[in-house]
Amino acid sequence: MNNILEVKDLKVSFHTYAGEIQAVRGVTFNLKKGEALAIVGESGCGKSVTSQAIMRLIATPPGEIKSGSSILFDGKTDIVKLTDKEMESVRGSEMGMIFQDPMTSLNPTMKVGAQITEGLIKHQGLSKQAARERAIEMLRLVGMPNPEARIDQYPHQFSGGMRQRVMIAIALACNPKLLIADEPTTALDVTIQAQIIDLMRDLQEKTGASIIIITHDLGVVADIAQRVVVMYAGKVVEQGSVDDIFYNPQHPYTWGLLRSVPRLDNDEKEPLVPIEGTPPDLFAPPKGCAFAARCPYAMEICLESDPEIENVSAGHSAACWLLHPNAPKVERPVEVGGHHNG
Amino acid sequence: MLRFILRRFAYGLITLWVIVSLTFILMHNLPGDPFANSEKLTPEARAILMKTYGLDQPIWIQYGAYVKKVFSLDLGVSFYYPTRSVNEIIAGTFPTSAQLGLFAITIAVIVGLTLGIIAALNHNKSWDYFAMFTAIVGVSVPAFVIGPLLSYYVGVKLGILPPALWKGPEYWVLPTITLSFTTLATMARMMRTSMLDVINQDYIKTAKSKGLSQITIVFKHTIRNAIMPIITILGPLTVNIITGTLVVEQIFAVPGMGKHFVQSISTNDYTMIMGLTIFYSALLILAIIITDILYGIVDPRIRLSKGGK
Ligand SMILES: Nc1ncnc2c1ncn2[C@@H]1O[C@H](COP(=O)(O)OP(=O)(O)O)[C@@H](O)[C@H]1O
Ligand code: SF4
Ligand SMILES: [Mg+2]
């Protein structure tokens, strides 16, 4: 078994007074051992909900992981079926998570050392002293200068970038097999962003952990990921290797995404083209393709029924009627992606 | 830390001096004087009394003398009970009020916080509704309703506990319950709000992502952060409650300080009013200093920003 994670038909809803929000509507993807997978997509498309479902961090109620969903972890456990108690021993020890805002994700009234050691003491049964030594070692590993002194400080004594390093130390303390990072650099300064991504890549090589990284930044994707999942309105619209997505994208939404961010390889000042319109209402998702209202290539069938996921090549798939053999051939916009000939 | 505390005390003394001065000025601008109500007083006797108490002196001399006395811890002689000093009256009644108040605040904190925590952890479930119903009843039913009810049913009808007076442990129960009721309800509501706020913070999600148990998360991460706003109001609340409350002390005939606050005003007892005001202010200032120190212990961010260490 070389998949650390197999997410199959994951559906998550939130029950609110206004009705049921179908935040995630059937997401399927796999993550190989030692691989880094990026999840991209506009805000609100269900990236955080997907990643939190994997760690069962969705509060229920109001959230609900629908029956039929399965999250197979490390070939044996279906996360969806674990009891709360069993889940506690998986969280933190086999999976760790880093959140978006390092300013709010550390407990302000607790020394950072204690925040690193509590997981170690719980999962590995270390003594206080041994856990402390391990915490210092972790801080050194994430590039914290003077960890022996810093370990006894409180979060407010650290900069944003340093706090995110502490978060990484917490997430990796017990040597988890899976690290989930939910927009770990969005809240940081540009120069710090690059350092954090470098650190994560470096640690992945050292520890062999698999990574799911959620990001808006296609530069980050190119830097760290091997595979990409593109999400739209609670579904996966396209997934493939980084090369597939950057150089041979198939879904009009992916085209739009690529055109709406600065090109990685191009010095010419090309205008960025934002995707017009807004995502559909998740209280009542359309019965056809969710992207139809914004898609320049939408056909009648797109409004009628939702396209199936079609394989493009090994490991590369997309859900769009344009992939149907009878669909008209569409020239995808030339300025999409990176090196066209490369 | 020691420097921080000393500095806070110095500021406290200055604040107290300002309060002493303000009280003095205000009192001397009120119409009437302590002997205005004694109709049988001849003008001569009145003049003698005014002289005895120094009231015929120019105001700034009276002020100087008063400040000097206050800071040597002498609050003067009551105008209303000429044989007793304000110090004596406070010494005679404050311990009783303080005892009752401390019992009440202890109960209020323990029960109130527990109710608030239970309510928050069972948000929108029956325990939450039960706790908040209790809290609303507690806030809206005043002591002069609960007090007599308890005194009559528990004290007189059932005869389990003495309905009034303050002579030993069994006498303490009913006044304590009555006095703690409102505060308890306030505590419960504040704690619930604060807990719900903290539960939604990102760092609670972080704690969960480490695989900590629900109990650890509640005790180590949630309560400690949720209790901050409570600490802020606890000081003034305690001072308020230990200096005696007229209503509860009247209902249960507790010989406390409460009645002197009211009586001193209706009798124009200058020294008593000023003495009680200053005593109350001094306690309040002390409570605020203690609150700051406590806050510094619980919240590391405060400790640093105030320069202590
Ligand atoms: N606790 C919640 N209650 C109700 N709706 C929620 C909750 N959490 C997320 N959602 C909804 O789920 C959808 C997906 O959210 P999210 O996964 O956070 O998006 P993103 O891709 O930006 O991370 C959004 O429409 C959001 O409103
Ligand atoms: S299915 Fe139709 S509407 Fe949806 S992305 Fe493809 S072409 Fe556009
Ligand atoms: Mg998100």
Image (cartoon, rainbow, N blue to C red):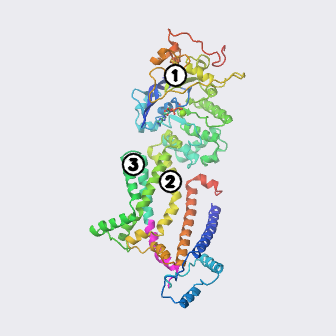
In the picture provided, is B304 more to the left or to the right than A97? right
Q: Nearer the viewer, residue B109 or A80?
A: B109
Categorize mark 3 by other alpha carbons within 10 Å: few (<14), some (14-19), many (20+): many
| Marking on residue B227 | 2
Q: Nearer the viewer, mark 3 or mark 2?
A: 3
Nearer to us of marks 1 and 2 is 1
Counting residues from the start of the chain, the first of labels 3 and 2 encountered is: 3
Residue toward you, A205 or B225: B225
Q: Which residue is mark 1?
A: A293
For disc 2, the chain is B
Which stretch is magenta? B83-102
Mark 1 against mark 3, which lies toward the viewer? 1
* Dominant secondary-structure state across the stretch colored magenta: helix
Residue B128: assigned label: 3
| Rendering quadrant holding ligand 3 | top right
Q: Is residue A315 above or below residue B19?
A: above
Give, as a three-letter code, the residue at label 2.
Ile
